[in-house]
Amino acid sequence: MQTIKCVVVGDGAVGKTCLLISYTTNKFPSEYVPTVFDNYAVTVMIGGEPYTLGLFDTAGQEDYDRLRPLSYPQTDVFLVCFSVVSPSSFENVKEKWVPEITHHCPKTPFLLVGTQIDLRDDPSTVEKLAKNKQKPITPETAEKLARDLKAVKYVECSALTQVRPQINQHFKAGLASMCLKFPNKGGNALLCLLLTAFSHKLHLTLCCVPVFLPSFPLSVAGTEERI
């Protein structure tokens, strides 16, 4: 079975681990434990063929700046994460994370992922940011950065609301985004699968966005969604 490697990077405490745990187990972790290194795996079907999607979680703290790049070789796609209610984590996308991954893997595509969107309209969170003359990152601002940095796509999600049973199933989607190269009749092609928990304001369902080529039949093992 062919393996697709997806490495997740970003500042500490922006929700990287929550995103992966929510996607792979449909459960939201009850407490925050800083990650050193961890990995998860799910099976996806592409064109009737099974692939192992390896999700590699990394530590965002500076203490692991030398250790973290050891997980980068042979990466097929990076997810560069920031919290929409942490302007500093958003700034570090440009100042730290994209320079780091492009230094080690200059030809590897990446997606920009905004997390914790459930807090964007939370009164206490907004008030706390306002005291520091800050405000949540808007989708438009993040999309502009994604274009400027040449990310494949910008997506955003909430690992918390994605697993709440009262959330309408139309808004439920996997919390992972990946780009992968796979062989077909035309040689290597790039397929971008975006499985993201969209804001309930968008009223969107599971989204599959092909990039540079026609769509392919795809499903995620262990879920009800099929594309």
Image (spheres, rainbow, N blue to C red):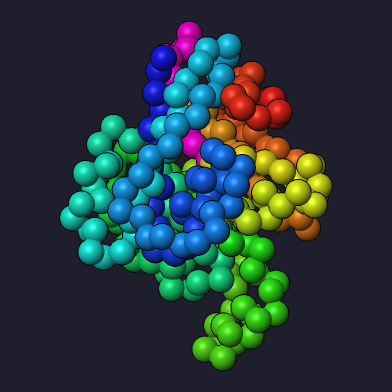
- Vertical comparison of 3 with 40: above or below: above
Q: Residue furthest front?
A: 30
Residue 44 shows in this picture: yes
| The stretch drawn in magenta includes residue 184 | yes
Residue 144 shows in this picture: no
Q: Quadrant of the N terminus?
A: top left
Q: Which image quadrant is residue 208 in? A: top right
Q: Nearer the viewer, residue 57 or 179?
A: 57
Q: Quadrant of the C terminus?
A: top right
Name the residue: 45% across, 24% down: 52
Q: Is residue 225 left or right of residue 41?
A: right
Name the residue: 78% across, 58% down: 201
Helix, strand or loop: magenta stretch: strand
| Residue 113 x %, y % | 52, 53
Q: Nearer the viewer, residue 219 or 91?
A: 219
Which contiguous range is marked in magenta?
A: 177-189
Name the residue: 47% across, 12% down: 184
Name the residue: 57% across, 14% down: 47
Q: Nearer the viewer, residue 54 or 156?
A: 54
- Vertical comparison of 132 with 197: above or below: below
| Residue 176 x %, y % | 54, 41
| Residue 2 x %, y % | 40, 18
